[in-house]
Amino acid sequence: MKQLCVFAHYDPQGRIGKCVELSLQRYSRFYSSILFVSTSATDVELARIKPLVTGAWTRPNEGYDFMSWKFGLEKAGALSAFDEITLTNDSVLGPITPLANLYAKPHLSRLDVW
């Protein structure tokens, strides 16, 4: 399966914190594509996480996470190429347990959105 993760980020100092980096490391083992969209990260910070993501961009700080997700979805191209799409942000800490365990739940395959 091809899974896309669009990760929205904001930090008042323009940093990508260790918690975000850890999340990206764990997501990178599971998702076939991670698109990181920040409204504040510096070029130095983006360069630091590039090995963990498929793409990393900054955009103007307008429209909250919804606009970052829209931006990322547009960068992804044909969404029909993906079996699953996850929209997340830097306020979600984790994953604490392996993502494979979460997605292995049989009832999830019957859901369109969860």
Image (cartoon, helix red, strand yellow):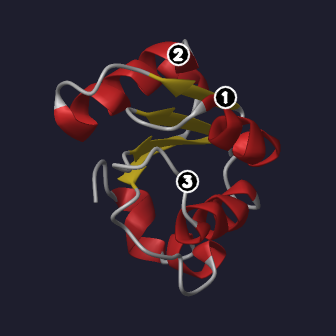
Callout 3: helix, strand or loop? loop
Residue 55 % position (x, y):
66, 28
Residue depicted at x 20% and y 24%: 62
Identify the mark at residue 87; answer none if there is no mark: none
Circle 3 sits on which residue? 16
Q: Is residue 40 above or below residue 71?
A: below
Q: Disc 3 vs disc 2: Cβ atoms closer than 8 Å?
A: no
**Residue 17: which quarter of the image?**
bottom right
Residue 51 % position (x, y):
82, 44
Q: Disc 1 vs disc 2: Cβ atoms closer than 8 Å?
A: yes
Residue 33 in view, yes or no: no
The answer to which of 1 and 32 lies nearer the viewer is 32
Q: Residues within 10 Å of mark 3 (few under 14, many from 20)?
A: many
Q: Residue furthest left?
A: 63
Residue depicted at x 36% and y 46%: 10
Circle 2 sits on which residue? 75
Mark 1 → mark 2, Cα distance in angstroms = 9 Å
Q: Residues within 10 Å of mark 1 (few under 14, many from 20)?
A: some
Mark 1 → mark 3, Cα distance in angstroms = 15 Å
- For this view, does 90 lie left or right of residue 103? left
Q: Earlier in the sequence, mark 1 or mark 2?
A: 1
At label 1, the amino acid type is Gly
Q: Nearer the viewer, mark 3 or mark 2?
A: 3
Q: Residues within 10 Å of mark 2 (few under 14, many from 20)?
A: some
Circle 1 sits on which residue? 55
Q: Is residue 59 above or below residue 46?
A: above
- For this view, does 46 lie left or right of residue 86? right
